[in-house]
Image: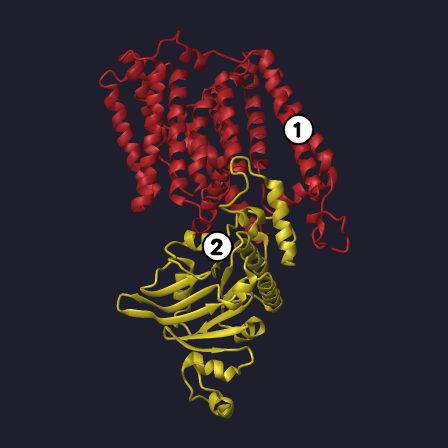
Chain colours: A yellow, B red
Amino acid sequence: MAENESSREPILKLRGVSKQFGAVQALEDIELDVFAGEVVALVGDNGAGKSTLVKILAGVHQPTSGSIQFMNRPVALDSPGKALEMGIATVFQDLSLCENLDVVANLFLGHELSPWRLDEVQMEVRAWTLLRELAARIPSVREPVASLSGGQRQTVAIARSLLLDPRIIMLDEPTAALGVAQTAEVLNLIERVRDRGLGVILISHNMEDVRAVADRIVVLRLGRNNGIFTPESSNAELVAAITGATENSVSRRQARKLEPTGA
Amino acid sequence: MNEPQAALDRSDSRVRHDEGIGGAVRGFIDRVRSGDLGVLPVILGLILIATVFWSLNPVFLAPNNLANLLFDAAAVGCISLGVVCVLMLGEIDLSVGSMSGLASAILGVIWVKAGLPPALAILVALASGAFMGFVYATLLNRFGMPSFVSTLAGLLAMLGLQLYLLGSTGSINLPYSSALVRFGQIHVMPAWFSYMTAILPGALILLLGLDRMRRRRAVQLSNPGGLSVLLAKAAILTAVLLVAVYYLNQGRGIPWMFGLFVLLVVLMDYALTRTQWGRAMFAVGGNREAARRSGINVSRIRISAFMLCSSLAALGGILAASRLASSSQQAGTGDVNLNAIAAAVIGGTSLFGGRGSAWSALLGILVIQSISNGLTLLNLSSSLRYMITGAVLAIAVIVDSLARQSRASHGRA
């Protein structure tokens, strides 16, 4: 791992990425940088293009035009397997866990140790070690995932994506269905993942969560970049950038503090 | 963390950790109460069936009758083992009966009519099974054709082919003196061999269990149950098997054909629970999209499952033909199809995918064959046999559904 280099150069660099679905321009000229050891929040209203961007980075969709550089090399993410192999892991909103399998089986699914004589002991040890590093609270790794709470399932999904040693992990609405305590648990987990030196892309609707963990907040609006903010930015600024409505009650009240967007 | 010596998996104080035999029994009762019944209903059902038929006609439990029962169980049991594979994916194969009939027709035509070596006939029959499975899986993968429909079409087509192959005579007798027919009708294990096979499972459980305990201790994992549970399991299993083998050896003994079936069950169980392929089978049955995203090749898993199912159905057809010493138009028709599917379900493999075990084929077929055998002993007509088997199947599915609801409400998938 070239920490020095990656601290200056972004591990992931998008330039002019566009995506067209027939007549619909879903993304246009998107620019995005992700550095090692930072959390980039991707926010925007419904239809802003967040999910399309995530799917492009996960290798599900291919961009119509534009360049993607990963670790300073231009890459083509033409399948989910390729993205995963390269080191871009995605935790989808519906988590993709098999409820009938236990935690260990889910963590190692598709990448089991010794395929012809599964090494359950070694897999269990690695599962516990990883969960402990993340300070995750999972009561037993031998229970089926169906018996876990929403936050625990999110933890398992995130831990699974870490198992392949990715450089970047994308989380699609990780706190959407969670309660207060579970949300806090997942946000702690995100910070621990960042502290491991990974780049984290966090997609969320919840400004509280975004502000709690993000180092930079990238706003998308109608498929275009609409400004990059810091967690210190006010709610009104973010809302204005997301909705495009500078003329609303919140913005008028805070008009004096408003800075030009797209800085 | 504050206790460096604590086992890796015992750091969460909220979880009750069951120790020793008492803990194992308590854990078992917990699982049953929450709807994770395992094989319990089938074992209870078998005991009930045996008691009822024995009280109506003591011949039912005579060693020779039980040996007969095992001979009969092997063929449909093999078919049922294949059905477990496709049910595991949440798919179905309705054509296993026709497949077995077609395999027996192929055997008769190539071996007896054409006079070619029986080994070749068996190979062709198995290969045709593998081919049909490949066709079903491809129809599903390429065209999204539900297996329910494609196998229904296969049922008709293969029944037609079977009738066509057998021609106007309608049946071909297999030579009684041949090894295959003797295998299906007469050959039983020598007593010393059967006793050794009765000891083997317990010994294996003990050795593998000790090895597992040693490896877990080496990496700081706890050993739930520990040595006492392991010893108890091995001892109980060995005792039960020894009694069963002793009893059967009072009569004709244990059929080799049944031995072959049990061997296939053991191999399938290993493949399903101890290999990456088996893990992928459970994953595809549990959540196909999740499996795909984990990098599992869902199409290939389906192909393997359907090919195994049809091949085992063909093998079942060959065993049935050797049992009856004939390839006839009746082979594979009637209740063969539904008995094979019912056995898998009665044994505890879910119709909805993602839950099941190779052992369900063995247990399920013992239930079905016991009922059929018992009713035959009572001289009851097949009409009644169908109705009673139907009722048992319904009860098994109801138990499965209730258990599933209970599992869901107890958070156990």
For mark 1, name the chain: B
- Depth check: give the residue in front, A251 or A226: A226
For mark 2, name the chain: A
Q: Residues within 10 Å of mark 1 (few under 14, many from 20)?
A: some
Asked if residue B173 shows in the view, the reply is yes
Quadrant of residue B190 within the rendered picture: top right
- Residue bearing the label numbered 2: A96
Which residue is depicted at the point 47% across and 50% down?
A: B294
- Depth check: give the residue in front, B276 or B250: B276
- Depth check: give the residue in front, A54 or A29: A29
Pointer 2 and pointer 1 on the same chain: no
Which residue is depicted at the point 54% across and 11% down?
A: B252
Asked if residue B333 shows in the view, the reply is no
- Does B200 appear above or below B253? below
- Residue bearing the label numbered 1: B207
Looking at the rendered structure, the kind of residue marked 1 is Leu
- Depth check: give the residue in front, B142 or A25: A25
